Image (tube, rainbow, N blue to C red):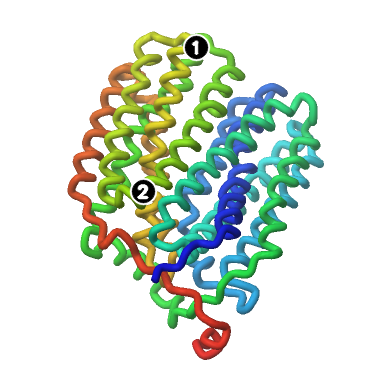
Amino acid sequence: MERKTAPATWWLLTSLYTTQYLGLGFLVVALVAILRDQGASLDQIGLIYMLGLVWPLKFLWAPLVDRIRFGRWGHYRVWLLLTQTGLALTLATMGRFDVIDDFWTIYLLGLAVAVLSASQDIAVDGLACRLLAPSDRGFGNGIQIAGNLFGNMLGGGVVLITYPYLGWQGSLLLLAAGTSVSLLQLLWYREPPWALVPNLGANLFRSVATFWHQPGGRLWLLLLLLYPIGSSLAYALIIPILVDAGWEMDRIGFAVNVLGSLAGMAAAMATGWLLPRLGRRRGMIWAALLQILGIAALALPVFGLTGTVSVTTAVLLYFLLYNPAATVLSTLMMDHASPDRPATDYTVQYSLNMLFAMATMSGAAALAGQIGYGGVLGLAVLAGLLAALLSLRYRPDGGTTTITAPVSAAAVGEAR
């Protein structure tokens, strides 16, 4: 009989997936706006954006999180305690320096936030892979996508709104306090003891390399790389189009970062709830088709309808219809993770997907200069159609992967 996920686990995962994005959302949204408002150069702004590259590279140290254990204190729990504590302290420390005069100190602390949040994500993904029953993974990944959007909205949008009242130090202390919510939960949480896997550290990277040579592995790799192209090309158009249309930054932030995030959160949670009822394959096909409609909705601003109603409608439809695909894809990543190294396998898949998405977004601006916004949107729709066609060929291996079950403390002792 399949075990059910405890309510306390849901609350913990919701908190962790939200707080991991508080600092990152602050860096790439609020900090950029604050720096520019105080006269920072565009070169400095570009350096801040480069901090986002840490997350796609986290696969480089993900094996350490799977390999290094902490005995009876808990495997992933201790990693999470360390990273959450580091995040809270780093954010609080950042508030003690001047954002312009101490730019390089702020930048190094921002780099620490990016590394710590990426490491926290590795650990929470590994924990989620092991804790969530296969039938609960859809809802769990709905929580992940919604939590990330919510954390980004709070750390970026809400902090920026309250910044005139709280100031620099007050905003950073608020972020540190928000991050500490998860830390308090972790202090009371007891991770189940897992059966030890012999020789986990041996040939770990070679084992990950063979991941793609499993039955269906190459098609899955192609889907991971292709799935984000359409939505990434389309998303890269939103801000430039609105800036060209004369929208103010706060108006753009509200439409995209607040309304869009809320729509995406609702879509992710609904998809997570529906996925066990639809099944993995049908869910993937439907998500791919919905993604095409979401991309196509951006035709409204692309072809000149940049009034409030048109843009809001387009943005809401994009986020509503794109995030089901993100939720299904992350659920399938969890299914493909092995029981021996769940954090590593999940992170490798996520990193490849994110790197391809970021590369596509970077290239969208250059493409738009050559073929126009309409041409890029047309390519995005074609990429979405190709992803939908490939999803028709995908066959989940029974829909799930069985994760190593918790064992008694005595069994752990015997395994040692």
Image point 69% across, 48% down: which residue?
Answer: 179
Label 2 SS: helix
Identified by mark 1, the residue type is Thr
Label 1 SS: helix
Closer to the camera in the image, 308 or 381: 308
Residue 202, above or below 92: below
Residue 293, above or below 133: above
Image point 80% across, 36% down: which residue?
Answer: 170
Image point 69% across, 26% down: which residue?
Answer: 161
Name the residue tied to disc 1.
308
| Circles 1 and 2: CB atoms closer than 8 Å | no
Marks counted in the figure total 2
Which of the marked residues, 1 or 2, is nearer the chain's N terminus?
2
**Residue 363 locus on image (x, y percent):** 37, 31
Identified by mark 2, the residue type is Leu
Does residue 194 appear left or right of residue 328 in this picture? right
**Residue 184 locus on image (x, y percent):** 72, 57
* Residue 275: numbered disc: 2
